[in-house]
Amino acid sequence: MRRYLISFEDGAMAFPEEDLPEVSRASHEVVQEAKDAGVWIFGAGLNVHEVSVVATDGVVTDGVPPQSTARLGGFSIIEVPSLDEAKAWAARIAVACRCAQEVREIMFDPES
C-alpha cells in the first residue's frame, strides 16, 4: 500500500459564503466514506493567515505570508494500492470541496 497527499492551495475554495454549509457537509461525507473504506489516514485545513518561516540559519520570521507565494490550504493523507485509486479519491474530494486537488505520493523512508 502507498500513501498519498491530496492537497489544495489556499484560496482555491472560491465559492459563495452561503454555500459553506453544503460544502462542509459534502466534504465531511467524503471523509467518512474514506474512513469507512479504510483508506483515511489524516487530513485538515490550514490556518494560513499568519505563518512562521524558519530559515536554514534558524532565523524565524512571523507574520502574514507573502502574496506571491502559493501556500497550502488543506490536505488529506490516504493509503491506497495505486495512484489511480488516489486520483479517484482526489476527484471525490475535489467535487465535495469545489476546488482542484493535487495528488502526490508520499515517499516512504523505512528508517523514519
Image (cartoon, helix red, strand yellow):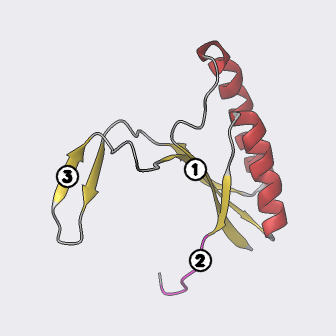
Q: Position of residue 83 (x, y in %)?
A: 78, 68
Q: Amino acid at mark 3?
A: Thr
> Is disc 3 in contact with disc 2, using a CB cutoff of under 8 Å?
no
Q: Which residue is mark 3?
A: 61
Viewport quadrant of the N terminus = bottom right
SS under mark 1: strand
Q: Is residue 11 above or below residue 9?
A: above
In the image, residue 100 above or below residue 80: above
Q: Residue at x 41, y 38 (%)?
A: 47
At label 1, the amino acid type is Phe
The amino acid beneath tag 2 is Met
Residue at (23%, 71%) from the top-left corner?
56
Front-lying residue, 25 or 70: 70
Mark closer to the chain start, 3 or 1 = 3
Identify the residue at image location x=65%, y=27%. 24
User: From where the camera sits, is residue 29 visible?
Assistant: no
Residue that appears at 47% across and 49% down: 70
Between marks 3 and 2, how big is the CA–CA gap?
29 Å
- Residue 94 rendering spot, x and y as whole percentages: 73, 42
Magenta stretch, residue numbers: 106-111
CA distance for labels 3 and 1: 24 Å
Residue that badge 2 annotates? 107
Q: How many marks?
A: 3
**What kind of element bears circle 3?**
strand
Q: Main secondary structure of the magenta part?
A: loop
Mark 1 or 2 closer to N-term?
A: 1
* First in sequence: mark 3 vs mark 2: 3
Characterize the local packing of mark 3: few (<14), some (14-19) or many (20 or more) Cα atoms within 10 angstroms. few
Residue 97 seen in render? yes
Task: Name the residue furthest bottom.
Answer: 111
Q: Which mark is residue 75?
A: 1
Which of discs 3 and 1 lies nearer the camera? The answer is 3
